Image (cartoon, rainbow, N blue to C red):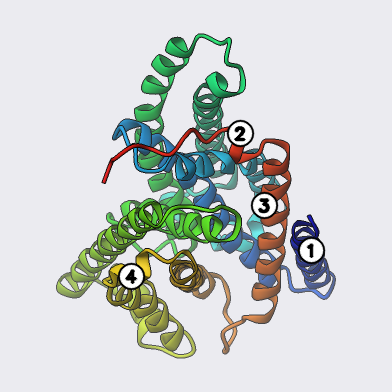
Amino acid sequence: MNETRTKLRVCQALLALGVATFVVALALGQPVRAWQAFLLNFLFWTGIVQSGVVFAAAYQVSKGRWSDAFRRMGESLVFFLPVSLVLFVAMMLFGASSIFVWARTPVADKRLWLSVPFLGTRDLLVFAGLFALSAAYVHYSQRPVLHPAEDAERCTRRTRVLAPVLLIAFGLGYSLIGFDLVMSLDPSWYSTLFGWYFFVSAFYAALAFLAIAAALFHHLTADETHDLGRLLFGFCLLTGGLFWAQWLVFWYGDLPEEIAFVIRRYYRMPYAPLAWTATYGAFIVPLVVLLSKDLKRKPKRLMAVACWILAMLWLERYVWIVPSIWSGASAPLLIEALITAGFAGGFGWGWMAHNRHLPLAALVGPPPGASH
C-alpha cells in the first residue's frame, strides 16, 4: 500500500511539474515551445494507449493463449482515450496557429485540405471512432468476467466482429493521423510510407510499455515474459524494416520534396546527433540486445530494454516534429522534457487509479495450459 501511494505521489508531482511548465511557457511568450511539446506527447502517449487496445484485439484475432494478463493490460489502457479526445480538441482550438505553419500562411494548392477546421474535424472523427470501437470491444471482452450471469457467447460473438474492425480502423486511421499531424507540419514533404510506419512504430512503443508495466505491477511467469520479449524483438525488426524501406526511397529517389526533410534532420546541426541516436537506439541496439534468450526471460532486464526503446521512440518523434515547427538555432529540450514528465505523470496516475477501480487480477483468468 505504501509503495502504491508513493508511486501515485510521484505521478502527481510530475503532472504538476508538467502543467506548471506549460503555463509558464505560455506566460513567457513561448507558445511554440509549449504547443510543440504538447503535440509531441499527445501523439506519443495516445499512440501507446490506442495500440495497447489494438494489441488486445490482435490477441483475440490470432486466438492467442500465451498470456491473458498482457491482453488485459492492453485493454486497461482504454481509460486514456476520452482524455486524448479532450486534449486533441484543446490543441486544435488553442494551439493550431502555433503548431501549423499553414494555419498562419495557407498553402495555395492545399488550402482546403490543410485548413484547421477540416483537418481538426476529420482527425477528431478518427480519434472518436477508434475510441468508440475500443470502448465497445473492451466492454464486451470484460463483461463475461465482471458479470458472470451475462451471455458469454453473445459477448464473444461481438468481440470477434469488433476485433478485426478495430485493427483495420487503426491502420487506416493512424495512417491519416501521421499524415495530418506530422507530415503536414512541413507541407513540402511527401512520403507515402510514413503513415504505415507511424502506426507500426506506435504499436512497437505499446509493446515496450507493456513490458515495463508487467515488470512494475504484475508477477508473470518467465515464459510469458519471454513471449513478450520475442514479440518486442519481432516488432523491432518490422518497424526498423519499414524505416529502412522509407529511407531507401528517399535515397534512390533524390527528390527535393523528400530528401530535404531527411537532410535537415540527419545531416544538419543541431538535430543530426539526436536523429542518429534515435535511429540506432530504437532499432539496432534493441535488435542486438534482444537476441539474448536469458534477458527476455527476466522481467527487470526486459523492462530496462523497454525503457530504452520508449526513450528512443520519444526522441524519434521529437526529431519528426520539432524541426518542422521550431526555427531557433539550437535544439530545444528543457521545456519539452518537463512537459513530457507531466504527460507521463498524468498517464501513470490515471492508469493506477483505473487499475485500483478495476484490478487486473479480477479480469485475468487462470494461467494457460501447456502452450509453449
Cα distance, mark 2 to mark 4? 30 Å
The kind of secondary structure element at disc 2 is helix
> Residue shown at 23%/64% (left/top)?
241
User: What amino acid does circle 1 point to?
Assistant: Thr
User: What amino acid does circle 3 point to?
Assistant: Met
Cα distance, mark 4 to mark 1? 31 Å
Which mark, by number, is residue 6? Answer: 1
Cα distance, mark 3 to mark 4? 44 Å
Are the residues flagged by discs 1 and 2 in contact, CB closer than 8 Å? Answer: no
The answer to whether residue 244 is left or right of residue 71 is: left
Which mark, by number, is residue 83? Answer: none
The kind of secondary structure element at disc 3 is helix
User: What amino acid does circle 2 point to?
Assistant: Ala
Disc on the earlier residue, 1 or 3: 1
- Which residue, given by chain and number where applicable, does mark 4 sit on? 294
Q: Nearer the viewer, mark 1 or mark 2?
A: 2
User: What amino acid does circle 4 point to?
Assistant: Asp
